[in-house]
Structure formats: C-alpha cells, structure tokens
Image: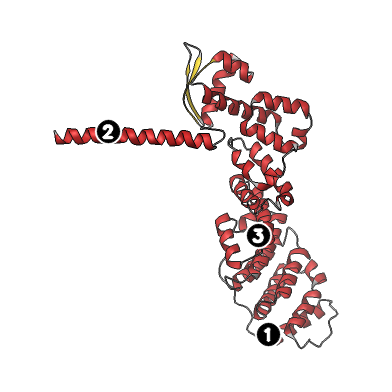
Amino acid sequence: MDSSLPVFIDLPEKDQAKEIRQYLNSAGADLGDYSKENIHDELSSLLDACDNWLKSASDADLEAMMNSFISLILFCANDAKLTKKFILKLTDIGASENNALLRIKLLNNFFIGLPDNNPLRYDVYIGQLQLSIKFGHTKMMTTQLKKVKEWLGVWNVELEEKRTCYRLLHASLKHEHRSDEATRVMLELLSTYDEECASLAKDDAVECIIDFISKPDVFIMDHLLQLKPVSALKGQLIHELLTIFVSGQLTDYNTFCTNNPDFIEKSGLDHLANIEKMKILTMISLANQEKEITYQKIIQTLGLTEDNLEEFVIELVKSGLVHAKIDQINERIIIRSVGFRTFGKNEWESLQQKLQTWVTNLNVIKTNLEQVVQS
C-alpha cells in the first residue's frame, strides 16, 4: 500500500463537520441543521447517519467523505470509540466487491495518519485484513509475519488481540496460496497458548495438523506434538493420526483407516496422498535401521511392485531426507545418508558423538600436518 498521507481539506474542524452534516442532509439523512457542541459527539452522530448513504455512494463521493471523516477523527486523537465506529461503518455498511479496494485504501490513509506506536493502528489493520479476505484483495496488504509481530509489539496489544490478528493473517496468506508462510503464522498462533488455556485452541490445532499432513513436501512433524494445543487433543483421532505420521508405519496408517473408515475424508485429507507420504516415512524409518535394503523387503513392506520400485526411490530421494542409489545387479537399495523423523534425546546424543569423532579426527589431521611442516 502507498505509505504517503493524503492532504485533507484545509478547514477548521467544526466547519468541516458542518459541511458533512449539510451534505448528508442533502443526501436524505435526517440530522437537522444544528451541530453538537462537542466535536466527538458530532462525529459519532454523523457516522450513525451515514448508513443509507454508504450503501449507494459513488466511489468519488465515498473517497471525499471518508477522507474528511479521517481528518476529523485524527484531530480527535486517541478516541477509540470513534475510531472503531468509523472502521465498522467502512467495513460492514455497503462494502462490496466493487468498492472494497477503495475502502482498503481509505483505511490505509487512516493507518498512516496515526502515529506509529498508536494502538488504534491495530483496529485499522484488522479492518483492512477483514475486507481484503472477504473480497479477495489480500495482495494489497502487509502480511509478512516478521513485520506484523513487530507492529503488535509496538502497539502493545493484548494476547487475545494477537490471536485474532494471527488467525486473520493465516486466512489471508492461505487466500494468496502462500502455504508455507500461513503455516508459520499458525505455529506462531498455537505457541501463544500455555497448558492452562490450550483447550481453547483445539480447532486451530486440528487445522494445523491437517495442514501439515496435507503438504506434499512436509515429512517432519514431531515438533507439533510439543505444542500445548496439540497435546490437548490426546485421545482424539486427529492426534492419533498425527502420531502415526510422526513415528508410525504404513501398516499403522492402513489399520487406522480400517478402524475409522470415514475420518480421512471428513477431515478433508487425500487418502492416496497420505499413503504415498506414509510410504516415504516408513522407508525413512527402515533406512535408519538398515543401510542396504533388498528389493523384496521394500516391496513387501510398502506394497510396491518391481515395476514402480525405481519410481518410488526417485520420489524418496526427492524428499531430501534420504540419499540412496539403486544396485540393480544385487537387487538392493544402498543408503548413503538418511534423516530422522523424530529428533529427541537419543538423536542429540548420537549427533554429539559424531561431532566429537569429527573433532578428534580433525585434531589428528592437524597434528599430522604440523609434523609435515616441521619436517
């Protein structure tokens, strides 16, 4: 959005409010001729009289009138009630696909007019997000998580307001098909819940789990189990399904589907895509146990055929979690390196041992090189 503040009409505030009153009366409002003495009360009264006009105003009239309101509300610094009423009028009354973009721009004028640290910027930004999501203008918005987190900190908003913002931000990013960024926002949202209030975020946790499972290029999900709202789902089918994708095998997934035949479809997940992902995850577990795996074992474990074995290995390598080569003569897969599906205490200890070995080896090389140089 444009970051420059528009120039508003150069009139004393009460004269400007009087012109708005006269204009609304001419447009059919029943306001009378006499303004209220208090400018705050006057603006509130004028906003209340705008409803019918907002439903039919031309873009030119809408822009002129709303910019006048903005200049007057900015004059009434930090009037939260007035600000929220203005935002509500602009986002709810007469908003349509035809004028939504103009309304977002008007709210941007308001946003820029407020000081950087003014908490009312939060309300304006939320109004912009709501309009952009409803009418498909999300690309007009600032939606980078890092920037929004910075704003929320500067505005010093309450925790529940942060959550509201993150939910809208998540919806906005999903609308733009920026799934990776949307996922990061969802994780940020879930991280705001502790054990005491984790149950309040169950719907968000379910959505997060489904989002991770459905992503074709995401295989590591063990970190989700550490989130309090996800832990609160223990005992539910969605948590059982996540556990299978974290550490289970293809046979576990097939058993789950047999026992709960309608769950996958009702969750909006793709059963065939789930099977393909579970094949890769099962193979990763197998590759952590054996460095040379016969064709026959892979075929039996994953339900493959010799005809599609090579294609599967290619997809396995594409996942980035396994480096392997096919030994066609001996009919086996040779594992060169493999990642971990879960990374807990045992994996950290294994990593520590490897690093210590590398340090020892490097020290030996260094000593040998020093002896060569001295010679």
Q: Is residue 306 left or right of residue 62?
A: left
Q: Which label's residue is closer to the chain start, 3 or 2?
A: 3
Q: Secondary structure at mark 3?
A: helix
Mark 2 neighbour density, 10 Å: few (under 14) some (14–19) many (20 or more): few
Q: Which label's residue is closer to the chain start, 1 or 2?
A: 1
Label 3, label 2: how many angstroms apart (C-alpha)? 54 Å
Query: x, y (%) of residue 97?
Result: 73, 57
Figure quadrant of the N terminus: bottom right
Task: Determine which of the numbered discs, if any, sits on residue 162 in the image.
Answer: 3
Q: Which residue is mark 1?
A: 13
Q: Secondary structure at mark 2?
A: helix
Q: Is residue 26 left or right of residue 156?
A: right
Query: x, y (%) of residue 232?
Result: 71, 45
Up the image or down, 290 lies above or below 129; here it is above
* Residue 356 figure quarter: top left
Mark 3 neighbour density, 10 Å: few (under 14) some (14–19) many (20 or more): some
Up the image or down, 167 lies above or below 52; here it is above
